[in-house]
Image (spheres, rainbow, N blue to C red):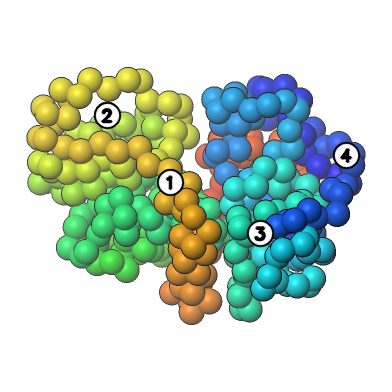
Amino acid sequence: MRAVQVQETGGPEVLQVVEVDAPAAPGPGELLVDVGAAGVNYIDTYHRSGIYPMELPYVAGLEGAGTVAAVGDGVEGVAVGDRVAWAETLGSYAEQLLVPWDKAVPVPDGVSDDAAVGALLQGMTAHFLVNDTAALTGGETVLVHAAAGGVGLLLTQLATAKGARVIATVSTPEKEELARAAGAAEVIRYTEVDDLAAAVHELAPDGVDVAFDSVGRTTFDASLAVLKRRGLLVLYGAASGPVEPVDPQRLNAAGSVFLTRPKLFDHVVTTEELRERAQAVYDDVAAGRLDVRIGHRYPLEQARTAHEDLQGRRTTGKILLVP
């Protein structure tokens, strides 16, 4: 079968489409899945570049959705022909994949494979950020960086639904339109301002309750500078590169503020947690309360282009690889 393999760490050019052996029959507790769509996420670029060390070679990708082709012993409640999705099974950039049943979630009728992928890793991330990390209750002012990205659009929708006022940052007029459609009350085009923190303070003179920052190095200082006293900076990504070590006294000087660096997989530790969170997100998608924007679909052969576009901030919404 075809798969996208990484044989050495580096830039997008190390992604190679190769012929590899198809998976064997599923073992106990496993599903053999025909991959309908694989999600492209920033964590894939961290693996590829070596920021997160991996054993080489490996087939890239953690997330996808597809149709069950075979069921291993001991798996109950799923049959050949059912659709499932997953968010933490390495090897997803491929035509077929063995997925542990305890890492899979059922995809309900009314949710396409594309939407199932678009709403899973990124949707569950947005879900835990607003419900657990920040625990929004309504009335807050929050800053969302990269608001037209895959997580950003979902995060903006969920925060707005919670009753928060969202100030979004984007880079282009097209992305501003998307952020506003997702519910952003105010939008800053960061490419057109000299001082991002000052631009935020013009819209929120008292500061923001929460800054959701997936960009990292280039936005961290501004995010810290715009917090209210006892505000919360949620650093959940590093699209522009890792943040340098932080002196805790900076949190003191900023007004006894809080800094956290959460990740999804600490919020879906058990199969029960995973499926409950996924079901909550899929319920919103099926009911039309959460719009999943698929920005682009690339064939496997264009995995390199997909990574280049993602890291070059040329994408909006969710991007997919389609075997």
Q: Which residue is mark 1?
A: 266
The percent position of residue 322, horizontal first and vertical second, equals 75, 54
Examine the rendered structure and indicate whether residue 105 appears above or below residue 253.
below
Q: Which residue is mark 4?
A: 20
* Foreground disc of the pair 4, 3: 3
Using a 10 Å C-alpha cutoff, classify the residue at mark 3 as few (fewer than 14 neighbours), some (14 to 19) or many (20 or more): many
The span from disc 3 to disc 1 (Cα, nearest Å) is 19 Å
Q: Which residue is mark 2?
A: 221
- Dot label at residue 101: 3
The span from disc 2 to disc 4 (Cα, nearest Å) is 45 Å
Task: Kindly check if marks 2 and 4 are in contact, taking CB atoms under 8 A apart as contact.
Answer: no
Q: Earlier in the sequence, mark 1 or mark 4?
A: 4
Seen at 17% across and 30% down, the residue is 251
- Dot label at residue 144: none
Amino acid identity at mark 1: Asp
The span from disc 4 to disc 3 (Cα, nearest Å) is 23 Å
Amino acid identity at mark 2: Asp
Q: Nearer the viewer, residue 146 or 50?
A: 50
Q: Secondary structure at mark 4?
A: loop
Judged left or right of residue 278, residue 35 is: right
Amino acid identity at mark 3: Trp
Q: Earlier in the sequence, mark 4 or mark 3?
A: 4
Q: Nearer the viewer, residue 272 or 322?
A: 272
The span from disc 1 to disc 4 (Cα, nearest Å) is 32 Å
Seen at 54% across and 25% down, the residue is 51
